[in-house]
Image (tube, rainbow, N blue to C red):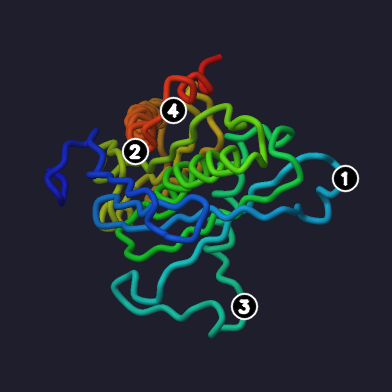
Amino acid sequence: MRIDGREPFELRPIKFQRGFSRYAEGSVLVEWGNTKVLCTASVEDKVPPFMRGTGKGWISAEYSMLPRSTHQRTQRDISKGKPNGRGTEIQRLIGRSLRAAVDMTRLGEKTIWIDCDVLQADGGTRTASISGGFVALFDALRWMVSCSMIEKIPVRTQIGAVSAGKVCGMPMLDLCYEEDSSADVDANIIMTSEGEFVELQGTGEGGVFSRSELDEILSLGWKGICEIHRMQAEALEMTEAEKALFLR
């Protein structure tokens, strides 16, 4: 039995509360078990210097944890005078993952910033940020269409992310903090609605793992991501035309 009573293949309860921020073009509060992340999407009418003149847009992300989002207080990066290495790696992952969802040639020379602020952490903050970031991004693109900044929503696939691993010799989906900190194998899986991988991060924390164990972990991950895609679509109240964006 898992610490929170779930079966090995079960996700924690997930809720996407859209429109949480009054000012952002897209926003969502993600509640994922005891993890809570605020994701906002902001539209800028410019691109980074390396993209100027290409006619293409860009999506970038920033990630941070509030000082008391964990069991002990942690200093803000500004107090330390240097960026947090873990946070930098995660925000790059979020940006890569969400860029995979969008046809940049149809975005025009505009940047969408996805800011992910962890209010409370109980494992899976990066996967919650990616899954919630997609919801905020989609609403920002809707806003751009409504303002005639773009003609159509340039999304070509959904992006969902989940953790999975092996704890006490058993494959498990969606690890909470206690499971993650004691896992034999820990993986973060990011996939499209077609079942293609955007990124796969996997580590044998407590030893090695076999190909069959990896296959089982990936199967659990895909099962969880399919459920996350369904919840994203429900939260976004997608029209049939919007759902058709993901049909090849």
For the point 33% across and 46% down, the residue is 16
Q: CA distance from mark 4 to mark 2?
A: 36 Å
Of the two numbered discs 2 and 3 on the same chain, state the one appearing first in sequence. Answer: 3
**Tag 2: Cα neighbours inside 10 Å, few (<14), some, or many (≥20)?**
some
Res 221 visible: no
Q: What amino acid does circle 2 point to? A: Ala
Q: In the image, which is nearer the foreground, mark 2 or mark 3? A: 2
Q: CA distance from mark 3 to mark 1?
A: 32 Å
Percent x, y for residue 66?
A: 41, 72
In the picture of the structure, the residue carrying the numbered disc 2 is 235
In the picture of the structure, the residue carrying the numbered disc 3 is 82
233 lies left or right of 157? left
Percent x, y for residue 71?
A: 29, 73
Q: Which mark is residue 53?
A: 1
154 lies left or right of 105? left
In the picture of the structure, the residue carrying the numbered disc 4 is 211
Q: What amino acid does circle 4 point to? A: Arg
The kind of secondary structure element at disc 4 is helix
Q: Nearer the viewer, residue 14 or 56?
A: 56
Q: Nearer the viewer, residue 145 or 5?
A: 145
To which quarter of the image does residue 8 belong? top left
For the point 36% across and 33% down, the residue is 237
Percent x, y for residue 83?
A: 60, 72
Q: What amino acid does circle 3 point to? A: Lys
For the point 44% across and 63% down, the residue is 117
Q: In the image, which is nearer the foreground, mark 4 or mark 2? A: 2
Percent x, y for residue 43?
A: 62, 53
Of the two numbered discs 4 and 1 on the same chain, state the one appearing first in sequence. Answer: 1
Q: CA distance from mark 3 to mark 4?
A: 39 Å
The kind of secondary structure element at disc 1 is loop
